[in-house]
């Protein structure tokens, strides 16, 4: 096994102010591979801007501006992430959810609020 060592001890990452993380399972359990590039970008953005409970209040126009998405790309990515059980959205607030046991295919829209 390769021994790990810190390459630059003066620049070790720390959580200062904000709070975001992505579980290692996101890669090892196949969640990354189950997403399109647009879905990955939106998911990473929501993880980065969310608080310790996974909540974010960013509006669609702000998200589209930051990610250079069209409104259609945003809606498609958002709905896919909802369908895959990675986020919920109530029309105002996003919540990044704990990862489900395994990656899922998009579920039907029933019971989920879409714009």
Image: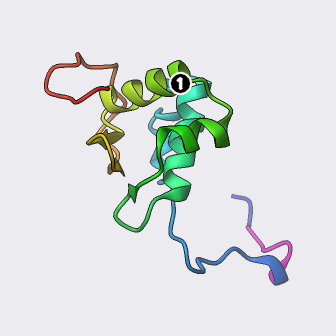
Q: What kind of secondary structure does the magenta stretch mostly adopt?
A: loop
Q: Where is residue 9 shown, x and y percent of the image?
A: 81, 82
Q: Nearer the viewer, residue 44 or 23?
A: 44
Rendered residue at 56%/34% (across/down): 40
**Outermost bottom residue:** 10
Secondary structure found at label 1: helix
Determine the residue located farthest toward the left in the rendered image: 111
User: Is the residue marked by circle 1 packed among few (<14), some (14-19), or many (20+) residues within 10 Å?
Assistant: some
In this picture, residue 40 sits left or right of residue 102? right
Q: Quadrant of residue 2?
A: bottom right
**Colour scheme shown:** rainbow
Q: Is residue 50 above or below residue 45?
A: below
Q: Going 60% across and 23% down the picture, which residue do you hit?
A: 70
Count of picture labels: 1
Rendered location of residue 18, percent (x, y): 54, 72
Residue at 55% x, 56% y: name it. 48
List x then y, in percent, for residue 71.
53, 24
Determine if the magenta segment contains residue 7: yes
Q: Is residue 49 depicted above or below 75 in this figure?
A: below
Q: 104 left or right of 75?
A: left
Can residue 96 be seen by looking at this rendering?
no
Q: Name the residue under label 1.
A: 71
Quarter where residue 83 is shown: top left
Residue drawn at x 43%, y 66% as measured from the top left: 51
In this rendering, position of residue 4 left or right of residue 56: right
Is residue 89 at least partly visible in the picture? yes
* Residue 45 rendering spot, x and y as whole percentages: 57, 47
Q: What stretch is highlighted in magenta?
A: 4-9
| Quadrant for the C terminus in the image | top left
Looking at this view, is 84 or 59 the one in front?
Answer: 59
The verdict on residue 31 being magenta is no
Quadrant occupied by the N terminus: bottom right
């Amino acid at each position: 096994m390769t021994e790990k060592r810190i390459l630059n001890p003066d620049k070790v990452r720390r959580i200062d102010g904000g709070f975001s993380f992505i579980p290692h399972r996101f890669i090892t359990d196949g969640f990354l591979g189950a997403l399109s590039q647009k879905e990955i970008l939106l998911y990473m953005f929501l993880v980065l801007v969310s608080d310790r409970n996974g909540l974010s209040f960013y509006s669609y126009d702000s998200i589209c501006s930051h990610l250079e998405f069209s409104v259609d790309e945003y809606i498609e990515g958002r709905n896919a992430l909802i369908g895959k059980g990675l986020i919920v959205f109530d029309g105002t607030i996003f919540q990044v959810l704990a990862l489900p046991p395994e990656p899922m295919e998009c579920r039907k829209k029933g019971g989920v609020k879409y714009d």
